[in-house]
Amino acid sequence: MMDVLRIIDILKERGEKIATAESCTGGMIASSIVDIPGVSAFFDEGYVTYSNEAKHKNLFVDWEILNTYGAVSEECAKAMAEGLYRQTQADVCVCSTGIAGPDGGTKEKPVGTVYLSCRYKGDCKVIRCQFPGSRSEVRQASAEKAFQLVYECLTK
């Protein structure tokens, strides 16, 4: 994951911090960050908010969003990023929510549907992804795409 190293270099250079809130990736994004030495200089906090209750309690995701659009939605991914910022004030807030499988998919949101969000400098970008493969492959692809999203937000 070359993007991780590029991201860390940018964060160090700018004196900025990153925080994560993860559902379907279950900590993989944070784990990739903490693999890098000196992590405390740029990593703020990491949350695993797998359940709706955790999204609401830790990230302030409104129940109306969860009940109306579901946890796997653009609205929820954006609310997670905004809530993570509210919780940490980190410069970069990156979040994941999706269906890694093998169960849980629907016709509208099949297994592999993932929403990723990145909040940076007051702007929040959300992308919808559809990843093929096993649970492990969906989670890995989601984490990799999350770093691509962060890199894009930092360099736009």
Image (spheres, rainbow, N blue to C red):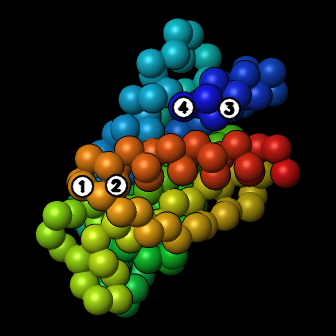
Amino acid at dot 2: Val
Distance in Å between CA atoms under marks 4 and 3: 10 Å
**First in residue order: circle 4 vs circle 2:** 4
Image quarter of the N terminus: top right
| Element type where label 4 sits in the image | loop
Distance in Å between CA atoms under marks 4 and 1: 19 Å
Which marked residue is nearer to the observer: mark 4 or mark 3?
A: 4
Q: Which residue is mark 2?
A: 138
Residue drawn at point x = 64 percent, y = 52 percent: 149
Q: Is residue 87 visible?
A: no
Disc 2, disc 1: CB below 8 Å?
yes
Distance in Å between CA atoms under marks 2 and 1: 6 Å
Left or right? Give the position of 17 relative to 107: right
Distance in Å between CA atoms under marks 4 and 2: 15 Å
Residue drawn at point x = 48 percent, y = 53 percent: 95
Image height of 91 relative to 111, above or below: above
| Element type where label 3 sits in the image | helix
Q: Which residue is mark 1?
A: 134
Disc assigned to residue 11: none
Q: Which residue is mark 3?
A: 7
Amino acid at dot 3: Ile
Residue 12 appears at what percent x and percent y? 73, 20
Which marked residue is nearer to the observer: mark 1 or mark 3?
A: 1
Residue 16 appears at what percent x and percent y? 72, 30
